[in-house]
Amino acid sequence: MVSTEQIDLSKLPQHIAIIMDGNGRWAKKRILPRLIGHTTGVKTVKKIVEFARKLNVKVLTLYAFSAENWQRPEDEVSGIMKLLKVYLANETDNMINNGIALNVIGDISRMPEELQKDIKNAVEKTKNNKAMILNIALSYGARQEILRACKILIDKGIKNPTEKDFSDSLYTAGLPDPDLLIRTSGEKRISNFLLWQIAYSEIYVTDVLWPDFNEEEFIKAILDYQKRERRFGKIA
Ligand code: FPP
């Protein structure tokens, strides 16, 4: 058993990013439709957002829907869109009450128009909150984000950009890079997530499927991170 008290608060990761994988497998194991896996995954999202806030994590980034996920069957895509809509309707007030600012990264122009409005509305309503930034990656791909940043720099006439100019042109402009990247359900890949920003992130992969991920698993990831020596290319 692990507990919150074991966490060294002076070494808490400021920014935690999560690839929430395994909803489909969780459902398959139970002979349930994939969408039930996603619905259960949303419950985990609520739990982990609440817990990260309690721990005082400053930025939490969740990979909810990738640019490539548009290629999934139409009913699964529309089901996830509906879950997002319900999540925003249910959670925006909670975010306000808990000082959470919602930020969405990705090409939301591809999302259903009504959902785009809901997203903009929730972002606007929560924008002055200061305790934690909840970044949700929607219709997000890191290569697409990098290309977009190049275009922004070209449009600005910046011919010799610095790393800072580049970072400032990403969806995550102004945010610290993730200290810790968690991936659930065992796959050891990055899947086009935050390719620029994770240059020095510590990676933690757990076999636990996202619907089964919980506070205890989150603590385990943080404790594992705290055992690591981060050298950023230097020597100790
Ligand atoms: C990965 O599992 C999960 C997704 C592609 C969707 C994640 C979506 C949610 C958790 C719900 C919406 C999110 C929010 C923020 C309300 P998978 O389907 O790839 O699982 P598999 O690899 O086992 O098939």
Image: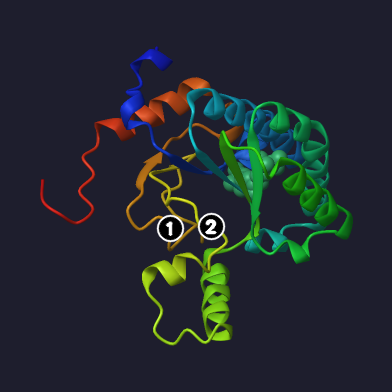
Residue 233 as seen in the image, left or right of residue 188? left
Say whether disc 1 or disc 2 marks the residue closer to the N-terminus. 2
Q: Amino acid at mark 2?
A: Thr
Instruction: Say above or below: 107 vs 21.
Output: below
Other residues around mark 2 within 10 Å, as few (<14) / some (14–19) / many (≥20): some
- The answer to whether residue 147 is visible is yes
- The residue that disc 2 covers is 172
The residue closer to the viewer here, 193 or 27, is 193
Residue 29 as seen in the image, left or right of residue 56? right
Q: Is mark 2 within 8 Å of ligand 1?
A: no
Rendered-image quarter of ligand 1: top right
The percent coordinates of residue 75 (x first, y second) are: 83, 52
Residue drawn 70% across and 32% down?
95
The percent coordinates of residue 7 (x first, y second) are: 36, 21
Residue drawn 41% across and 79% down?
161
The residue closer to the viewer here, 93 or 48, is 93
Residue drawn 64% across and 31% down?
99
Q: Are marks 1 and 2 in contact (CB under 8 Å)?
A: yes
The residue closer to the viewer here, 107 or 57, is 57
- The residue that disc 1 covers is 197
Q: Nearer the viewer, mark 1 or mark 2?
A: 2
Where does the C terminus fall, quadrant-wise? top left
Q: Amino acid at mark 1?
A: Gln
Name the residue furthest left.
236
Secondary structure category for the residue under label 1: loop
